[in-house]
Amino acid sequence: MQILYFLANLIGPLVKVLYNLIGNYAATMIVATLIMKLLLFPLAIHQQKSMAKMSVFQPLMNEIQQKYKNNPQKQQEEMMKLQQEHGFNPMAGCLPMLLTMLVLFGFLGVVYYPVHYIFGVSDAAVKTACETLGLATANATNMQTQLIQAIHSGAAISADIIPADVVAEIQNFNTMFFGMDLCDIPGFNITPIAIFPIIAAVTMIASYIFTQKLSGMGAQMQGSMKIMMWVMNLMFVSFCFNAPVGFSLYYGVSNLFQIVQSFVTYRIYSPEKFKAQYEAELAAKRAEKKKKKTLTIEENGQTVTKEVTGGEANKLRLELARKREAELYKDERTTPLQDK
Protein backbone atom coordinates (compact mmCIF):
# COMPACT_ATOMS: atom_id res chain seq x y z
CA MET A 1 0.00 0.00 0.00
CA GLN A 2 2.97 2.34 0.55
CA ILE A 3 3.12 3.05 -3.17
CA LEU A 4 -0.13 5.01 -2.70
CA TYR A 5 1.60 7.27 -0.17
CA PHE A 6 3.76 9.04 -2.78
CA LEU A 7 1.98 12.39 -2.21
CA ALA A 8 3.16 12.20 1.41
CA ASN A 9 6.55 13.28 0.03
CA LEU A 10 4.92 16.66 -0.72
CA ILE A 11 2.46 16.85 2.16
CA GLY A 12 5.08 15.98 4.81
CA PRO A 13 7.34 19.01 4.07
CA LEU A 14 4.22 21.22 3.86
CA VAL A 15 3.18 20.03 7.33
CA LYS A 16 6.67 20.76 8.68
CA VAL A 17 6.72 24.30 7.25
CA LEU A 18 3.26 25.01 8.64
CA TYR A 19 4.17 23.50 12.03
CA ASN A 20 7.20 25.80 12.28
CA LEU A 21 4.79 28.72 11.85
CA ILE A 22 1.92 27.40 14.02
CA GLY A 23 3.60 25.25 16.66
CA ASN A 24 0.79 22.71 17.09
CA TYR A 25 0.35 19.45 15.15
CA ALA A 26 -3.48 19.49 15.27
CA ALA A 27 -3.77 23.09 14.07
CA THR A 28 -1.16 22.35 11.41
CA MET A 29 -3.15 19.39 10.09
CA ILE A 30 -6.30 21.53 9.90
CA VAL A 31 -4.52 24.29 7.97
CA ALA A 32 -2.77 21.77 5.68
CA THR A 33 -6.15 20.14 4.97
CA LEU A 34 -7.71 23.47 4.01
CA ILE A 35 -4.77 24.33 1.75
CA MET A 36 -5.00 21.02 -0.11
CA LYS A 37 -8.78 21.34 -0.50
CA LEU A 38 -8.41 24.88 -1.86
CA LEU A 39 -5.80 23.66 -4.36
CA LEU A 40 -8.25 21.00 -5.55
CA PHE A 41 -11.20 23.40 -5.69
CA PRO A 42 -10.83 24.22 -9.43
CA LEU A 43 -11.00 20.49 -10.16
CA ALA A 44 -14.20 20.26 -8.13
CA ILE A 45 -15.76 22.92 -10.37
CA HIS A 46 -14.55 21.05 -13.46
CA GLN A 47 -16.09 17.85 -12.10
CA GLN A 48 -19.43 19.59 -11.54
CA LYS A 49 -19.42 20.86 -15.13
CA SER A 50 -18.55 17.39 -16.43
CA MET A 51 -21.39 15.80 -14.48
CA ALA A 52 -23.87 18.38 -15.76
CA LYS A 53 -22.75 17.67 -19.31
CA MET A 54 -22.97 13.93 -18.75
CA SER A 55 -26.57 14.30 -17.54
CA VAL A 56 -27.46 15.52 -21.05
CA PHE A 57 -25.63 12.82 -22.98
CA GLN A 58 -26.33 9.88 -20.65
CA PRO A 59 -29.74 9.16 -22.28
CA LEU A 60 -28.08 9.14 -25.72
CA MET A 61 -25.39 6.77 -24.46
CA ASN A 62 -28.03 4.49 -22.94
CA GLU A 63 -29.88 4.51 -26.26
CA ILE A 64 -26.74 3.43 -28.13
CA GLN A 65 -26.01 0.70 -25.57
CA GLN A 66 -29.53 -0.67 -25.92
CA LYS A 67 -29.61 -0.41 -29.71
CA TYR A 68 -26.26 -2.19 -30.22
CA LYS A 69 -26.25 -4.43 -27.15
CA ASN A 70 -25.51 -7.46 -29.36
CA ASN A 71 -22.79 -5.71 -31.36
CA PRO A 72 -20.05 -4.41 -28.99
CA GLN A 73 -17.85 -3.17 -31.82
CA LYS A 74 -20.61 -1.08 -33.38
CA GLN A 75 -21.60 0.14 -29.92
CA GLN A 76 -18.03 1.34 -29.31
CA GLU A 77 -17.91 3.06 -32.71
CA GLU A 78 -21.17 4.91 -32.06
CA MET A 79 -20.00 5.94 -28.59
CA MET A 80 -16.78 7.37 -30.01
CA LYS A 81 -18.72 9.17 -32.75
CA LEU A 82 -21.05 10.71 -30.15
CA GLN A 83 -18.13 11.88 -28.00
CA GLN A 84 -16.21 13.34 -30.94
CA GLU A 85 -19.25 15.05 -32.41
CA HIS A 86 -20.26 16.78 -29.19
CA GLY A 87 -16.86 17.12 -27.51
CA PHE A 88 -17.36 15.44 -24.16
CA ASN A 89 -15.48 12.80 -22.21
CA PRO A 90 -17.36 10.42 -19.86
CA MET A 91 -14.18 9.99 -17.80
CA ALA A 92 -13.56 13.72 -17.28
CA GLY A 93 -15.25 13.70 -13.86
CA CYS A 94 -13.05 10.87 -12.57
CA LEU A 95 -9.81 12.86 -12.27
CA PRO A 96 -10.90 14.97 -9.27
CA MET A 97 -12.10 11.82 -7.45
CA LEU A 98 -8.78 10.10 -8.16
CA LEU A 99 -6.73 13.06 -6.93
CA THR A 100 -8.87 13.35 -3.79
CA MET A 101 -8.23 9.70 -3.04
CA LEU A 102 -4.47 10.09 -3.58
CA VAL A 103 -4.40 13.11 -1.25
CA LEU A 104 -6.22 11.03 1.36
CA PHE A 105 -3.53 8.36 1.10
CA GLY A 106 -0.89 11.08 1.21
CA PHE A 107 -2.18 12.36 4.56
CA LEU A 108 -2.54 8.77 5.76
CA GLY A 109 1.14 8.22 4.97
CA VAL A 110 2.11 11.35 6.91
CA VAL A 111 0.23 10.35 10.09
CA TYR A 112 1.46 6.74 9.88
CA TYR A 113 5.08 7.70 9.20
CA PRO A 114 5.56 11.25 10.61
CA VAL A 115 9.22 10.75 11.56
CA HIS A 116 10.03 9.88 7.96
CA TYR A 117 7.80 12.28 6.02
CA ILE A 118 7.78 15.29 8.38
CA PHE A 119 11.29 15.10 9.87
CA GLY A 120 13.05 13.42 6.94
CA VAL A 121 14.49 10.47 8.89
CA SER A 122 15.11 7.36 6.78
CA ASP A 123 13.03 4.25 7.38
CA ALA A 124 16.22 2.33 8.21
CA ALA A 125 17.15 4.84 10.93
CA VAL A 126 13.62 4.73 12.36
CA LYS A 127 13.75 0.94 12.48
CA THR A 128 17.13 0.96 14.20
CA ALA A 129 15.94 3.53 16.76
CA CYS A 130 12.81 1.48 17.48
CA GLU A 131 14.87 -1.70 17.86
CA THR A 132 17.16 0.10 20.30
CA LEU A 133 14.16 1.18 22.39
CA GLY A 134 12.38 -2.18 22.08
CA LEU A 135 9.57 -0.71 19.98
CA ALA A 136 10.18 -2.67 16.81
CA THR A 137 7.17 -4.74 15.80
CA ALA A 138 5.93 -6.48 12.68
CA ASN A 139 3.32 -3.71 12.40
CA ALA A 140 5.51 -0.92 11.04
CA THR A 141 2.61 1.52 10.87
CA ASN A 142 2.65 1.98 14.65
CA MET A 143 6.38 2.29 15.19
CA GLN A 144 6.91 5.90 14.15
CA THR A 145 4.16 7.37 16.34
CA GLN A 146 5.36 5.17 19.22
CA LEU A 147 8.87 6.50 18.64
CA ILE A 148 7.61 10.09 18.91
CA GLN A 149 5.80 9.26 22.14
CA ALA A 150 8.91 7.55 23.52
CA ILE A 151 11.05 10.60 22.74
CA HIS A 152 8.41 12.79 24.40
CA SER A 153 8.77 10.58 27.47
CA GLY A 154 12.53 11.20 27.57
CA ALA A 155 13.92 8.23 25.62
CA ALA A 156 17.50 8.82 24.48
CA ILE A 157 18.43 8.20 20.84
CA SER A 158 22.06 7.98 19.75
CA ALA A 159 23.13 10.75 17.39
CA ASP A 160 24.63 8.02 15.22
CA ILE A 161 21.09 6.80 14.52
CA ILE A 162 19.09 10.06 14.38
CA PRO A 163 20.89 13.44 14.50
CA ALA A 164 20.57 15.24 17.83
CA ASP A 165 18.92 18.32 16.27
CA VAL A 166 16.20 16.12 14.73
CA VAL A 167 15.64 14.35 18.05
CA ALA A 168 15.27 17.81 19.66
CA GLU A 169 12.68 18.76 17.01
CA ILE A 170 10.71 15.59 17.74
CA GLN A 171 11.00 16.24 21.49
CA ASN A 172 9.39 19.66 20.98
CA PHE A 173 6.78 18.38 18.49
CA ASN A 174 3.46 19.29 20.13
CA THR A 175 0.96 16.53 19.27
CA MET A 176 -1.61 17.33 21.98
CA PHE A 177 -5.14 18.48 21.14
CA PHE A 178 -7.64 19.17 23.94
CA GLY A 179 -5.62 16.90 26.20
CA MET A 180 -5.48 14.03 23.67
CA ASP A 181 -2.39 12.84 21.79
CA LEU A 182 -2.82 12.78 18.00
CA CYS A 183 -0.27 9.96 17.85
CA ASP A 184 -2.65 7.60 19.69
CA ILE A 185 -4.62 5.01 17.76
CA PRO A 186 -8.27 4.79 18.93
CA GLY A 187 -9.15 1.32 17.65
CA PHE A 188 -12.73 0.17 18.08
CA ASN A 189 -12.75 0.99 21.79
CA ILE A 190 -14.86 3.32 23.91
CA THR A 191 -12.23 5.93 24.80
CA PRO A 192 -12.15 9.74 24.65
CA ILE A 193 -10.15 9.76 21.42
CA ALA A 194 -12.81 7.58 19.74
CA ILE A 195 -14.74 10.83 19.25
CA PHE A 196 -12.41 11.69 16.34
CA PRO A 197 -13.17 8.69 14.11
CA ILE A 198 -16.85 8.92 15.05
CA ILE A 199 -16.96 12.56 13.94
CA ALA A 200 -15.09 11.55 10.78
CA ALA A 201 -17.68 8.85 10.02
CA VAL A 202 -20.64 11.20 10.60
CA THR A 203 -19.12 13.96 8.45
CA MET A 204 -18.32 11.40 5.73
CA ILE A 205 -21.98 10.39 5.47
CA ALA A 206 -23.15 14.01 5.45
CA SER A 207 -20.52 15.00 2.90
CA TYR A 208 -21.42 12.11 0.60
CA ILE A 209 -25.14 12.91 0.69
CA PHE A 210 -24.71 16.66 0.11
CA THR A 211 -22.10 16.18 -2.61
CA GLN A 212 -24.22 13.70 -4.55
CA LYS A 213 -27.28 15.92 -4.29
CA LEU A 214 -25.71 19.29 -5.11
CA SER A 215 -23.14 18.25 -7.71
CA GLY A 216 -25.51 16.27 -9.90
CA MET A 217 -23.34 13.16 -9.52
CA GLY A 218 -26.06 11.05 -7.92
CA ALA A 219 -28.21 10.98 -11.04
CA GLN A 220 -25.26 9.88 -13.19
CA MET A 221 -23.86 7.13 -10.99
CA GLN A 222 -25.02 3.60 -11.69
CA GLY A 223 -25.68 1.14 -8.86
CA SER A 224 -22.22 -0.46 -9.03
CA MET A 225 -20.53 2.96 -8.99
CA LYS A 226 -22.54 4.05 -5.94
CA ILE A 227 -21.57 0.85 -4.14
CA MET A 228 -17.93 1.44 -4.99
CA MET A 229 -18.09 5.00 -3.63
CA TRP A 230 -19.64 3.79 -0.37
CA VAL A 231 -17.02 1.04 -0.05
CA MET A 232 -14.20 3.53 -0.62
CA ASN A 233 -15.59 5.96 1.97
CA LEU A 234 -16.13 3.19 4.51
CA MET A 235 -12.56 2.03 3.90
CA PHE A 236 -11.24 5.46 4.89
CA VAL A 237 -13.53 5.48 7.94
CA SER A 238 -11.97 2.17 8.99
CA PHE A 239 -8.55 3.82 8.63
CA CYS A 240 -9.74 6.49 11.06
CA PHE A 241 -10.21 3.84 13.75
CA ASN A 242 -6.94 2.03 12.99
CA ALA A 243 -4.65 4.97 12.20
CA PRO A 244 -3.28 7.66 14.53
CA VAL A 245 -5.91 10.25 15.46
CA GLY A 246 -4.25 12.79 13.19
CA PHE A 247 -5.86 11.10 10.18
CA SER A 248 -9.34 11.28 11.73
CA LEU A 249 -8.79 15.00 12.29
CA TYR A 250 -7.76 15.45 8.66
CA TYR A 251 -10.64 13.35 7.31
CA GLY A 252 -13.27 15.07 9.44
CA VAL A 253 -12.09 18.57 8.47
CA SER A 254 -11.87 17.47 4.83
CA ASN A 255 -15.48 16.25 4.91
CA LEU A 256 -16.71 19.48 6.51
CA PHE A 257 -14.90 21.49 3.85
CA GLN A 258 -16.44 19.26 1.19
CA ILE A 259 -19.94 20.08 2.47
CA VAL A 260 -19.25 23.83 2.32
CA GLN A 261 -17.62 23.40 -1.09
CA SER A 262 -20.70 21.60 -2.42
CA PHE A 263 -22.91 24.56 -1.49
CA VAL A 264 -20.45 27.07 -2.98
CA THR A 265 -20.02 25.21 -6.29
CA TYR A 266 -23.79 24.74 -6.50
CA ARG A 267 -24.33 28.47 -6.10
CA ILE A 268 -21.71 29.31 -8.72
CA TYR A 269 -22.19 26.39 -11.11
CA SER A 270 -25.63 24.90 -10.69
CA PRO A 271 -25.85 21.50 -12.45
CA GLU A 272 -29.39 22.35 -13.58
CA LYS A 273 -28.13 25.56 -15.20
CA PHE A 274 -25.35 23.79 -17.08
CA LYS A 275 -27.63 20.94 -18.04
CA ALA A 276 -30.04 23.44 -19.63
CA GLN A 277 -27.13 25.11 -21.41
CA TYR A 278 -25.78 21.83 -22.82
CA GLU A 279 -29.27 20.71 -23.81
CA ALA A 280 -29.71 23.95 -25.75
CA GLU A 281 -26.35 23.42 -27.48
CA LEU A 282 -27.30 19.84 -28.35
CA ALA A 283 -30.68 20.97 -29.72
CA ALA A 284 -28.96 23.64 -31.83
CA LYS A 285 -26.57 21.07 -33.31
CA ARG A 286 -29.43 18.72 -34.12
CA ALA A 287 -31.39 21.54 -35.75
CA GLU A 288 -28.34 22.44 -37.83
CA LYS A 289 -28.03 18.85 -39.01
CA LYS A 290 -31.71 18.81 -40.03
CA LYS A 291 -31.49 22.14 -41.86
CA LYS A 292 -31.79 21.73 -45.64
CA LYS A 293 -28.68 22.42 -47.66
CA THR A 294 -28.12 22.70 -51.40
CA LEU A 295 -25.76 19.98 -52.62
CA THR A 296 -24.59 19.54 -56.20
CA ILE A 297 -23.66 15.98 -57.18
CA GLU A 298 -23.16 13.97 -60.34
CA GLU A 299 -25.67 11.20 -61.14
CA ASN A 300 -25.55 9.07 -64.30
CA GLY A 301 -23.24 11.53 -65.97
CA GLN A 302 -25.43 14.52 -65.18
CA THR A 303 -25.02 17.30 -62.62
CA VAL A 304 -27.91 17.31 -60.16
CA THR A 305 -28.76 19.81 -57.41
CA LYS A 306 -30.51 18.46 -54.32
CA GLU A 307 -31.93 19.89 -51.11
CA VAL A 308 -30.68 17.62 -48.31
CA THR A 309 -30.13 17.68 -44.55
CA GLY A 310 -26.67 17.63 -43.00
CA GLY A 311 -26.97 13.93 -42.24
CA GLU A 312 -28.15 13.12 -45.75
CA ALA A 313 -25.32 15.19 -47.22
CA ASN A 314 -22.77 13.16 -45.26
CA LYS A 315 -24.31 9.90 -46.53
CA LEU A 316 -24.22 11.13 -50.14
CA ARG A 317 -20.60 12.20 -49.81
CA LEU A 318 -19.71 8.79 -48.38
CA GLU A 319 -21.49 6.99 -51.24
CA LEU A 320 -19.73 9.19 -53.79
CA ALA A 321 -16.35 8.49 -52.23
CA ARG A 322 -17.02 4.74 -52.35
CA LYS A 323 -18.03 4.92 -56.02
CA ARG A 324 -14.88 6.83 -56.89
CA GLU A 325 -12.75 4.33 -55.01
CA ALA A 326 -14.47 1.42 -56.78
CA GLU A 327 -13.92 3.10 -60.13
CA LEU A 328 -10.28 3.77 -59.34
CA TYR A 329 -9.47 0.17 -58.42
CA LYS A 330 -11.90 -1.65 -60.76
CA ASP A 331 -9.10 -3.07 -62.94
CA GLU A 332 -7.18 -4.60 -60.06
CA ARG A 333 -7.37 -8.40 -59.59
CA THR A 334 -9.76 -9.27 -56.78
CA THR A 335 -9.71 -13.10 -57.07
CA PRO A 336 -6.78 -15.42 -56.39
CA LEU A 337 -4.80 -16.90 -59.26
CA GLN A 338 -5.94 -20.38 -60.35
CA ASP A 339 -3.50 -23.24 -60.83
CA LYS A 340 -3.34 -24.52 -64.38
Image (cartoon, rainbow, N blue to C red):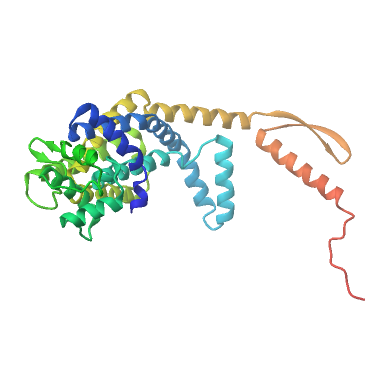
Residue 122 is left or right of residue 296, and the answer is: left
Q: Residue furthest bottom?
A: 340
Q: Residue furthest right?
A: 340
Q: Residue furthest top?
A: 268
Residue 31 appears in the picture as rendered: no
Residue 273 in picture, x, y percent from top left: 40, 26
Which image quadrant: the N terminus? bottom left
Residue 57 in picture, x, y percent from top left: 48, 38
Residue 284 is left or right of residue 39, and the answer is: right
Residue 36 in picture, x, y percent from top left: 32, 33
Residue 339, placed above or below residue 249: below
Residue 147, placed above or below residue 283: below
Total numbered circles: 0
User: Quadrant of residue 337 in the image?
Assistant: bottom right
Viewer-closest of 120 and 9: 120
Which image quadrant: the C terminus? bottom right
Viewer-closest of 167 and 158: 158
User: Quadrant of residue 259 in the image?
Assistant: top left
Residue 188 is left or right of residue 72, and the answer is: left
Residue 71 in picture, x, y percent from top left: 56, 57
Viewer-closest of 48 and 326: 48
Residue 243 is left or right of residue 290, and the answer is: left
Question: Which residue is pictured at 41% across the width and 42% down the height?
Answer: 94
Residue 94 appears in the picture as rendered: yes
